[in-house]
Image (cartoon, grey):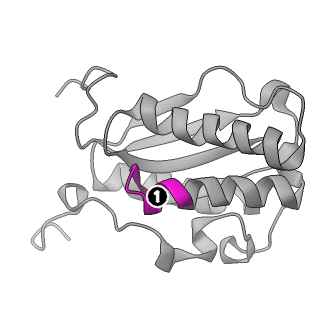
Amino acid sequence: MAAPPRGNTGSSTYFITAATFQKQSLFQSRKMASLLLDVLFNYMSQRKFLLHEFVIMPDHFHLLITPTQTLERALQLIKGGFSFRAKKELGFAGEIWEKSYHDRRVRDWQEYCAFRQYIHQNPVKKGLAEVAEGYGCSSAAAPGLMHAAPQRLKPSNSAA
């Protein structure tokens, strides 16, 4: 099955990576990381997208997300919303994001699980935490706050 055109993402779930401008470690700052978390949770609570998993690393973030409109709109809200608030609330004057982002449509439950594992283990592999649950800027540390995995990706009982 071919991926839907970018403007028509329907109910697809995506693994997203977005990097800071020139890989600056902006999110080493607790204020910047907390602001990005606030932006994510604010739009998630408004049902602008379903956020299944995330990790905020010092110079990039990864998401497992299901847009409710288009993928572009969801990323515009996240990146643009963060940029606006960082400039207004924190007085940040520089470039924040690389212009684009990497997206990969999640095709099945096994792929979803592999991306979730990657997201959770990213801070551990980079030496930022001993265990995934110990890294505060990750859904591994706050599993009850996330949207459940899309039902269409879950294996049937006979396949489990």
Secondary structure under tag 1 reads helix
Identify the residue at horizontal 43%, vertical 32% (top origin). Answer: 73
Quick check: 124 above or below 65? below
Taking the magenta stretch, the answer to whether it contains residue 45 is yes
Residue range (magenta) = 42-52
Identify the residue at horizontal 90%, vertical 31% (top origin). Answer: 93
Where does residue 115 sit, x and y in percent of width and height? Answer: 48, 51
Of residues 127 and 152, the one drawn nearer to the viewer in this rendering: 152
Which residue is identified by label 1?
A: 44
Question: In what quadrant of the picture does the C terminus appear?
Answer: bottom left
Query: Taking 73 as reference, is 10 left or right?
Result: left
- Pick out the residue farthest to the left: 158
Identify the residue at horizontal 82%, vertical 26% (top origin). Answer: 95
Where does residue 116 sit, x and y in percent of width and height? Answer: 49, 58
Quick check: 121 above or below 92? below
Of residues 16 and 160, the one drawn nearer to the viewer in this rendering: 16
Question: In what quadrant of the picture does the N terminus appear?
Answer: top left
Where does residue 11 sit, x and y in percent of width and height? Answer: 24, 43
Query: Taking 4 as reference, is 18 left or right?
Result: right
Taking the magenta stretch, the answer to whether it contains residue 79 is no
Tell me, yes or no, if residue 125 can be seen here. Answer: no
Quick check: 55 above or below 22? below
Where does residue 127 sit, x and y in percent of width and height? Answer: 84, 60
Of residues 95 and 138, the one drawn nearer to the viewer in this rendering: 95
Identify the residue at horizontal 39%, vertical 50% (top origin). Answer: 49
Of residues 73 and 65, the one drawn nearer to the viewer in this rendering: 73
Tell me, yes or no, if residue 135 can be seen here. Answer: yes
